Amino acid sequence: MFQTSLRRLLGGMALVSTLSLTGCGYNDFQRLDEQSLSGWSEVLNQYQRRADLIPNIVATVKGEANFEQETLTKVVEARAKATSIQVTPETLKDPEAMKKFQAAQGELSSALSRLLVVSENYPNLKANQGFADLRVQLEGTENRITVARNRYIKTVQDYNVLARSFPTNLTAMVMGYKPKANFSVANEAAISAPPKVDFGK
């Protein structure tokens, strides 16, 4: 009789505990945290994919006589800077780290855009099938970067709203769930579109 009552009491306590965890957003924090980490990994994968394309693009462009050396140098330097800055899951909560990472990737985007614009002045380069294929791969990668980045932004927004809203903000305080740093842009419309690249005809 006593054991039956004890089992019922423990079962009831477990049920109340489960309901309270669900109501306080604990499980939502876990889900969104995992989604944001997964989303960040995909962002990094796509940035790495772009970085991996650059040596081949530079090597192909170098084959063109009299190509602007300064443009090539800026691409190589921007790639080196972008790949040297890594924002790990642990530093995702640091807005300054995110700002540096984002700035470095932005510099690389600008350098690549400049290279592709300049390449339009070289008919032989435009006619080079290898270079054309690399440009198509780069365009596809820029699109994938945008998709991955936007998914990450949405997940982090959901997490941050949960961390700041009542009553789940109480859970965030107790459990130490701080808002995550996110991508930021001066022009909100710019984040929803990949960098503009004119690949010519």
Image (cartoon, rainbow, N blue to C red):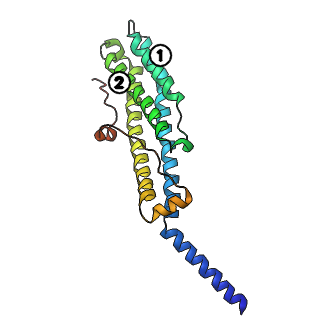
The residue at 41%/38% (across/down) is 145
| On screen, residue 130 above or below 43 | above
Q: Hey, what amino acid is under mark 2?
A: Ser
Location of mark 1 (residue):
59
In percent of width and height, residue 8 lies at 64, 85
Between 193 and 59, the one lying in front of the other is 193
Quarter of the picture containing the C terminus is top left
| On screen, residue 7 above or below 81 | below
In percent of width and height, residue 70 lies at 40, 12
In this rendering, does residue 153 appear at all? yes
Location of mark 2 (residue):
113
**Which element type, helix, strand or loop, lies under badge 1?**
helix
The residue at 32%/12% (across/down) is 122
Camera-side mark, 2 or 1: 2
In percent of width and height, residue 1 lies at 71, 93
The residue at 52%/72% (across/down) is 20
